Image: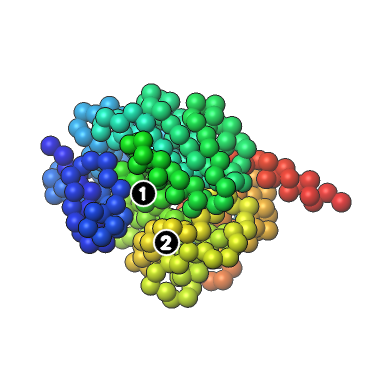
Amino acid sequence: MNTFRPVCWYCGETYEAEPIYTCRRCKGTLDIRYEYKEIFGKAYFEPLSASAGSDIWRFRELLPIWPNRKAVTLGEGGTPLIRTHNILNIANNQSLWLKLESVNPTLAFKDRPLAVAMTAAAQFGLNEVVCASTGNTGVAAAAYAARAGLRCTIYVPEGTPEEKRAAMEQYGAVLHTVKGHYSDAYKVAEEMALERQAFNLTSTYMNPYAVEGNKTVAYELAFQLGKVPDWIIVPIGAGPLLSGIYKGFKEMQLAGFIDKLPRMAGVQAEGCAPIVKAFHNGEAGVQPWSDPVQTIASGIADPLLTYPADGTRTLSVIRESKGIALAIADAELHRYRKLLAEREGVLAELSSVTAVAAAAHMQQTGLLEQNATIVSIVTGHGLKDMSAAINHTKGSVL
């Protein structure tokens, strides 16, 4: 018996479990809903919190996978949570923790949603997957497609780091470069997935099955900390990671495992920040980024040109959590990348560094309350875009 159904996030229309991306009634994005009474009718999180397992599949009853379906896995999840000592001048008994998603099998958080999506592709009997990617989604898609024995085609925008392109090709994916930005690659991938009847793994809210993998970050954080953090800071493009983490905490609250929810901070680069702009302007919806995209944080440089409603969905989650959206300048990304490596021994991708720079900004501007526990999500490893660091260092030599 299936305990999950795709449901329209906007109008509530419900569908059977199938390869579906948008609501047929209103074209809204989809969310996966579960028979929570059935799942939580027995103790659920308590025994898992004490279990020896560490990967995401110990939570499979809250993932959109049919019973007894073999998981497509490389051991994703169970990533470390470390407390910082030297990166910030911690005051007022505040504590900053780093969730190192950078140690997943392909060195980024994308392994969680892609493992779930690839397993869903197999359960639906599909033999090909397609995605648009600025890098990390494509690398994870290529790796998990190889693991599942499925064909994989990836569309990347100009400016995608060479390290990520090379990794995709090494895993055996077919790679196409699309002129323009991520939104341009998104459109091509959407068209080709329909034409070839391939499963679209693009990492916006496009694939509701993939988004569910992000929830497992929340479960792990609650287990590792033994409590709910006051703030969780997440780098965002369209924002499904932030939304997924918050949903995971809401599920734990529904199960009676926790009694509060975290506040969510979504961070973008100043050179491409459509969600931040809408947040600070008090707008109900997100508009596409009309200015030129100018940032070194390629992993989150999403102008939302053809799907601004994805940004609106993330904006609503930030506001529901009583959180904040903020933007970080490129100069700060280079600075905090170096500080994070030198002072904490953590080499992070430039997009990931936004979450650490944002923690510093929030502290300096008095946004962090006394005794606050803050978690910054380090979404990707610095080896994924080392060329950017090398070029910056060369440019700094007099």
What residue occupies the far right of the structure in this picture?
398
What residue occupies the far front of the structure in this picture?
195
Query: Which residue is labeled 1 in the image?
Result: 206
User: On the image, which quarter does residue 216 sit in?
Assistant: top left
Q: State the image coordinates of residue 389 (x, y, percent, origin top left).
A: 69, 45
At label 2, the amino acid type is Pro
**Quarter of the figure with the N terminus:** top left
Q: Determine the residue positioned at 27% across, 41% down.
A: 19
> Horizontally, is 68 left or right of 157 in the view?
left
At label 1, the amino acid type is Met
Marking on residue 115: none
Q: State the image coordinates of residue 69 (x, y, percent, origin top left).
A: 24, 29
Report the colour scheme: rainbow
Q: State the image coordinates of residue 42 (x, y, percent, origin top left).
A: 15, 43
Whole-number angstrom distance, CA of label 2 to CA of label 1? 12 Å
Mark 2 near mark 1, Cβ–Cβ under 8 Å? Answer: no
Q: Determine the residue positioned at 47% across, 75% down.
A: 281
Query: Which residue is labeled 2 in the image?
Result: 308
Name the secondary structure under disc 2: helix
Does residue 219 show up? no
Q: Determine the residue positioned at 26% across, 29% down.
A: 125
What residue occupies the far bottom of the structure in this picture?
282
* Along the line of sight, the residue nearer the viewer: 393 or 363: 393
Callout 2: 10 Å neighbours few (<14), some, many (20+)? some
Name the secondary structure under disc 1: loop
Q: State the image coordinates of residue 300 (x, y, percent, origin top left).
A: 52, 52
User: On the image, which quarter does residue 232 sit in?
Assistant: bottom left
> Horizontally, is 136 left or right of 263 in the view?
right
Q: Say which label, 2 or 1, has the lower sequence index.
A: 1
> Horizontally, is 26 left or right of 361 in the view?
left
Does residue 397 show up? yes
